Image (cartoon, rainbow, N blue to C red):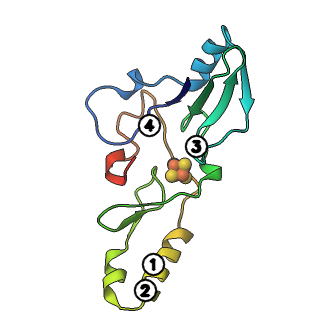
Amino acid sequence: MDLTLIETMPLGDIDGDRTEQFLPLSVVRDRLARTWTLEDIPFTTGGPARYVRVRETGGRIGFITPLTHNFCETCNRVRVTCTGTLYMCLGQEDATDLRAPLRSSESDEPLYRAIEDAISRKPKGHDFAIGRLASTPAIGRHMSVTGG
Ligand code: SF4
């Protein structure tokens, strides 16, 4: 059995206290390691999970740790919504409208320029924090807006 877990992220307004849902995966890994032998492996799906092999079972566990060990330094992802908004980072508000340049000309040049300008602004990473002092979400947008 392969498992992938993920730390809760401060995206979108929700009811309730998010700190009650946050469990650092470093803690999960430590607890699992009391019973099982976890070996880091270079396996990748191209996504953000880091994998270990469970020696005793041969199973694979993927940890997605946006808070305790973020993976922004290797991120080359952007997302386009169905309404033509290009988000350069899930953890930041900056975005570019691609509809206007797409519709402004029969040439693709305005669209290419808009994409290149947006990519040049891709941030280095998010500013997520979960704690008693961070009572509002880092980003008001829910994951479902950008897909994912
Ligand atoms: S927070 Fe932004 S930079 Fe970090 S992995 Fe997500 S999309 Fe990439």
Q: In this view, does 111 lie to the left or right of 4?
A: left
In the picture of the structure, the residue carrying the numbered disc 2 is: 110
Residue located at (54% from left, 25% from top):
24
Give, as a three-letter code, the residue at label 2.
Pro
**Image quadrant in which you'd find residue 61:** top right
Sequence-first tag of 3 and 2:
3
Mark 4 touching mark 2, by CB under 8 A?
A: no
Give, as a three-letter code, the residue at label 3.
Pro
Q: What element carries label 2?
A: helix
In the picture of the structure, the residue carrying the numbered disc 3 is: 48
Residues packed near mark 4 inside 10 Å, few (<14), some (14 to 19) or many (20 plus): many
- For the residues labelled 3 and 4, the Cα–Cα distance comes to 14 Å
In the picture of the structure, the residue carrying the numbered disc 4 is: 9
Q: In this view, does 7 lie above or below 34?
A: below
Q: What element carries label 1?
A: helix
Q: In this view, does 138 lie above or below 51?
A: below
Mark 2 touching mark 1, by CB under 8 A?
A: yes
Give, as a three-letter code, the residue at label 4.
Met
Is the residue marked 3 within 8 Å of ligand 1, measured from its CB? yes
In the picture of the structure, the residue carrying the numbered disc 1 is: 114
Mark 3 touching mark 2, by CB under 8 A?
A: no
- For the residues labelled 3 and 2, the Cα–Cα distance comes to 32 Å
Q: Quadrant of the N terminus?
A: top right
Q: Which of 89 and 78 is in front in this view?
A: 78
- For the residues labelled 1 and 3, the Cα–Cα distance comes to 27 Å
Sequence-first tag of 1 and 3:
3
Give, as a three-letter code, the residue at label 1.
Ala
**Outermost left residue:** 15
